[in-house]
Amino acid sequence: MASRARMPIIGRVTRHNTLDDGRLLALFPDAVACWTDLVRLGVDQSLPARRCRPGGGWTRLLTGVYLLTGGAPNRRQMVRAALLRAGPNAVITGVEAARRHGVRRVPAEGPVHVLVEPDSRLGSQSFMLVERSKRRWSTTVVDGIPLVSAARALVDAARREGRLDVVRSMIADGLQRNVCTIAGLTTELAHLRLRGSALPRMVLTEVDDGVRSAAEAWARRLVLRSRLPAPAWNVELRDEQGRSLAVVDAWWEDVGLAWEIDSREFHLAPADHERTTRRHSALTAAGVLVVHTVPSRLHKDPAGVLRDLCGAYDSAVTRSARVSGAHS
């Protein structure tokens, strides 16, 4: 854990009984200050208590941490407050860190999850979730905020999330956006005593099978409970000339059947819709039988989805047999 100077850095100054708000705001990033830095700056020790009274213009965010503009803090100010309260070696992890690394499919903003050294006596309070960790971490500064690695952030977020589909979405999004790698996640999960790691381990098992989204995971579970043989997942199909046709979600090569989980999220723009239409046409022209399913139907009507899929597979088997007979 790399040592890092306290934020903000304030040099030696002369003492003042009062300082105007403009000067204070210029000295403290995000208008968030801690008691010790205010005292070092020369502010009278009784000033924070007076300013945090109704009408005083400040807001107490955490013990010894103040918002100098008053009112409710924004998310960045909450993060800054948690770091100031936690001390110079603290770092952000979990959902907040994953979002700042670029993962989009994360839960709505919850507590600010902070990692501190194992001998720290700091406890969680208000919007700050404190975790003491013996596992060493590497620190990356993103937009002025110290974060753990994306893989560690995702694992820490997943360990505290009880909904399997949410864990699937977080991890799949991190992988699809190249924010982290399977190897990085696997390394983080190699710690056998890591509490709450059952769900992320389950998701990584699905990823090893080729599943890349929550909807595909629902589809995989449905197929495993059916009479259908296991397909290959996320397979690139090519024509006879070796040109890429599409990457399909599931593929039964022996009968030439593809399964597409069509999410509307990726087809709202006209250009996206046009690309999807061209891809479907190319698959059909190449003789690929394709079953299309929207993700919501996997939840609302799994029996109907399975019925359609089994029917398509039977048709593909019959077609394959006819083709083989014609060529014999």
Image: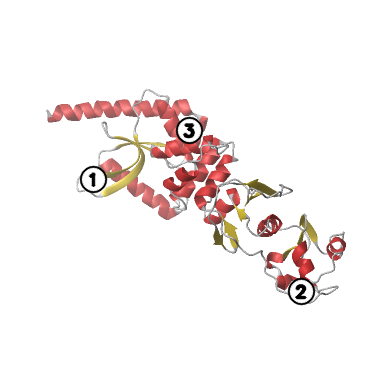
Q: Residue at x 21, y 26 (%)?
A: 321
Q: Check disc 3 and give the amino acid type.
A: Leu
Q: Is residue 210 above or below residue 12?
A: above
Lower position in the chain sequence, tag 3 or tag 2: 2
Residue 15 appears in the figure? yes
Q: Which residue is mark 3?
A: 298
Residue at the disc numbered 2: 22
Q: Residues within 10 Å of mark 1 (few under 14, many from 20)?
A: some
Q: Nearer the viewer, residue 242 or 47?
A: 47
Pointer 1 residue: 239
The reply to whether the C-beta atoms of the residues labelled 1 and 2 are less than 8 Å apart is: no
Tell me the number on the disc at residue 226: none
Which three-letter amino acid code belongs to the residue tagged 2?
A: Gly
Residue 105 shows in this picture = no
What x and y, as percent, mark residue 203? Answer: 47, 38
At 46% from the left and 45% from the top, the residue drawn is 187
State whether residue 35 is above or below residue 98.
Answer: below
From mark 1 to mark 3, how far is it between C-alphas? 30 Å
Q: Which residue is rendered at x = 68% and y = 65% of the image?
A: 30
Q: Secondary structure at mark 1?
A: loop
Could you tell me residue 265's position as x and y percent?
49, 47
C-beta proximity under 8 Å, tags 3 and 2: no
Between the C-alphas of marks 3 and 2, the distance is 57 Å
Nearest to the observer: residue 288 or residue 7:
7
Snapshot quadrant of residue 90: bottom right
